[in-house]
Amino acid sequence: MNVKNLFEKLFFKDIQADDYPSSRKSLMLVKVICTSVIVLVFLGGSLFVVTHAISHYKEARDNFLLEPERIEDTAVGLRKAVFFTKEEGDPTSVQGILAYLEGYEKGRLELEIGNINDIPVDLVSIQDKEGKNIYQFEENAILDPNDTIEYHIFEFYNVDEKITGNRQELFVNYSYGDGEIKQALVSPFSRIDDEIFISTDIRIKDNMSGFDFIAENDEYIYFVGDEVMISEPLFIPSGKELRVFAGQKIDLTTQAFIVTRATVDFAGDEAKPIRVFSSDGTGRGLIILQAGGRSTVSHTIFDGLDTPVSGVWSLTGAVTFYESDVDIQHSGFTNNVCEDGLNIIRSDFSITNSYFADSFSDAFDADFCTGLIIDSTFSRIGNDAVDASGSQLEIINANMESIGDKGISGGEHSQINIEGIQIMDAVIGIASKDLSLITGENISVSNSMIGITLYEKKPEFGPAFVDINNFHLTGQVDLDYLIQQKSILKIDDQLILPRSAAKESLLFEKMIAGELIQ
């Protein structure tokens, strides 16, 4: 059904009044009511109103065809459905507020409440399902009407945690100043703010014209000047490559980030490295999105960046390559304060002679990639040094030190070959999960809680596998191997059997739940 036909049906244009001569006035009344309903729906923007209006449409139309004298009753029903009321013509019978649960923890309760009526509303109390008032609003808690719904935050403290923990059984009592108490159910979810949808600008393809430091020639786009400050999101279209020259400094401020749908060439050198940083600590990083070619990053430092966020859209990496192949060499990812310092997704990559340091969470996350890591270091990492999902990787000559969780983690049917790896001061040296296979030789794990662990985290996959030669545990290692039943660990071609201690079962429960082991 196209839009025209829909409106014809909504306005009863497929019904001729001449067929029902005695009902001309009634037909006009229904048309006016339906028109009003549609206008109210679009003005109100409420999905609840839309649903009710549509549900009553067919009933109204059928009643007209079968019994024209029932049109007035149907019209009254429509008006009641739209205005949430059981009585017609009385504004105090209309539901007056909408309430949402914004926060609930440790005795703290936070509600967001808006007046949806056209008369003032007095907030009285919060009530539980048993009818007990658990908190009283202040006497002046009055919500005045407005042309648009204005929501107000109300916070309550020292509330019984048994009450705040049950999100679906809270009510707000209110009145219209006449002493009669009315009640509205508190939605157990946060209110969806339309502004976050309006402010999501990731679909922008090109806004380069708004930046006076951007230039281009027949071959590439580039930044003019040794120091460039970007204070709002920059979107570069596909086509010409983005080239950054040796020694340039790019300062991302006020939550700015760069999205490019073209390849990049960060052409720093040892004497003049490129630096991408945030002087005010709010910079949101770099995204290379379906670039259609292979990018190059050389002698570049990405320092102190966070993950890109725009409205409802966000990523996990300070630097992200999505379906964009890349070669990274002699570069650093440091002090990044997001989930992944570097995140590469559905791409082929190489990382050589590079370093990752002081990452808040994972240093490097490879999702559904093929790639190579050579001669690189990872130090002071909050979570995993290398986290691979559904990927085929080779890691050669890597040092990992002071790792908050796992040195190397393979999941979701990954295949990882490792050679010449040193892992020191980690919680877990090597973890293989969910049908992943980790093979290698010349590996050492020292001063860590667990040397190697294998387990199934996601039931849609299965057990895990590790086959390593010349593996060494040195220093203090609390538990050499943690092997879940059905997973297979081979060290120097010898099968290592799983143990069944209760303590190990508890450790598996923590890892499967994503909890840190301490």
Image (cartoon, rainbow, N blue to C red):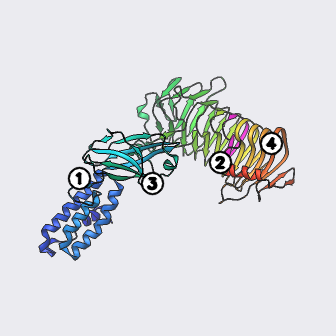
Label 3 secondary element = loop
The quadrant of the picture occupied by the C terminus is: top right
Magenta-colored span: 369-387
Task: Find out whether residue 225 is within the magenta segment.
Answer: no
Q: Quadrant of residue 499?
A: bottom right
**Counting residues from the N terminus, which is met first, the one under dot 3 or under dot 4?**
3
* Foreground residue among 50 and 86: 86
Mark 2 neighbour density, 10 Å: few (under 14) some (14–19) many (20 or more): few
Mark 2: amino acid = Gly
Q: Secondary structure at mark 1?
A: helix
Identify the residue under disc 4. 478
Q: Amino acid at mark 4?
A: Asp
Quadrant placement of the N terminus:
bottom left
Contact? badges 2 and 4 (CB < 8 Å): no
* Residue at the limit of the structure toward the front, as seen here: 132
Earlier in the chain: of badge 4 and badge 1, it is: 1
Point out residue 350 in the picture as x, y percentages from the top left corner.
Answer: 68, 41
Mark 1 nearby-residue class (10 Å; few <14, some 14–19, many ≥20): some
Q: Which residue is mark 2?
A: 514
The dot on residue 169 is: 3
Q: Nearer the viewer, mark 2 or mark 1?
A: 1
